[in-house]
Amino acid sequence: MAVIAEVKKLSITSQDLQTLVSDISFSLHTGKTFCLIGESGSGKTLTLKAMLGMLPNQLHLTGELLFNGTNTVPFTRREWQRIRGKQIGIIFQHPEQALHPAIPIGRQLVDLLRSHISITKLEAERQACRMLDKVGLKPADILMKRYPHQLSGGMNQRVMIAMALLLGPELLIADEPTSALDVTTQADILTLLRGLTAESEMSLLLVTHDLLIANYIADTIAVMVQGTIIEQGNAQDVIKHPRQEYTRILWEYRSKFMIT
Ligand SMILES: Nc1ncnc2c1ncn2[C@@H]1O[C@H](COP(=O)(O)OP(=O)(O)OP(=O)(O)O)[C@@H](O)[C@H]1O
Ligand SMILES: [Mg+2]
């Protein structure tokens, strides 16, 4: 099982020297799903932004962020442009912020493809259509022509997944991709992500505040509290035999909603 990305002793501090993320380390593997779980403000999104070279300028980071063995911390904007969106796919929480409102979704996929690889418009349309179909948007040839506002939140989130997968990323980073969706759509999207990860050798880094979601999808779980990882390990071990009181309480609260 190959390591795709490694976070080594990552710390992030603010301008006023507040420690926002403190000395965290974890590894991501091919074909596996890693869930970063934690309460609001614990530093999950900042960690992802650091891994994508998207940390705001006023924040300072130390540590190493390896992607395929190369430390990306000193990367220039141009170096990031080569891998972000291509080798590393991204799914945000709110698709409406990431999709262009005035361009049909099919064209957004076609433009993305053609901005990275040299193919004809017709071939790009074919690939875009195939990808929409793969993420469950059917009939894809008709939906290609729709604008984001003509689709539901769940459908737009599928478009986001299609865009993130279009260039065949080795790593997919998803920040609470389903928290704005209803429970059934949430389950469909998570099942889709789980299937895609299993079939394509891609590594998935998923941020969630929900241990139930982590239980469904994760191979490995890391629990974050106030900028530090308090425990991490095999998902079933962390959930069934938590070493930390905080994780145990998280699970107890979540279990209250389950029918047993
Ligand atoms: N640009 C910034 N400057 C200073 N502090 C920041 C900045 N961005 C985030 N923070 C702080 O860093 C901490 C971690 O933020 P982060 O967005 O990573 O939390 P999170 O775990 O993703 O929370 P949520 O579950 O609500 O999305 C928070 O206390 C936040 O206020
Ligand atoms: Mg966040």
Image: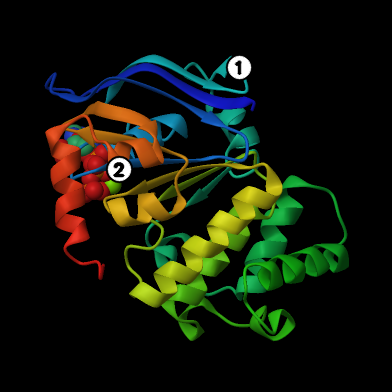
Relative side of 232 to 39, left or right: right
Q: Is residue 13 above or below residue 44?
A: above
Question: Which quadrant holds residue 61?
Answer: top left
Q: Amino acid at mark 2?
A: Ile
Residue shown at the point (69%, 48%) measured from the top left: 200
Q: Nearer the viewer, residue 7 or 231?
A: 231
Q: Secondary structure at mark 1?
A: loop
Q: Nearer the viewer, mark 1 or mark 2?
A: 2
**Measured from the top left, where is residue 55 in percent x and y?**
36, 32
Is residue 101 visible in the rendered image? The answer is no
User: Quick check: marks 1 and 2 in contact, CB under 8 Å?
Assistant: no
Q: Quadrant of the N terminus?
A: top right
Q: Is residue 73 above or below residue 247?
A: above
Q: Nearer the viewer, residue 185 or 244?
A: 244
Other-residue count near label 1 (Cα within 10 Å), few / some / many at <14 / 14–19 / ≥20: few
Q: Amino acid at mark 1?
A: Gly
Q: Which residue is mark 2?
A: 239
On residue 69, the disc is: 1
Relative side of 135 to 177, left or right: right
Question: Which quadrant holds residue 172?
Answer: top right
**Measured from the top left, where is residue 64 in percent x and y?**
44, 15
Is residue 214 visible in the rendered image? The answer is yes
Residue shown at the point (70%, 79%) measured from the top left: 140
Other-residue count near label 2 (Cα within 10 Å), few / some / many at <14 / 14–19 / ≥20: many
Q: Secondary structure at mark 2?
A: helix
Of marks 1 and 2, which one's residue comes earlier in the chain?
1
Q: Nearer the viewer, residue 252 or 198?
A: 252
Relative side of 177 to 114, left or right: left
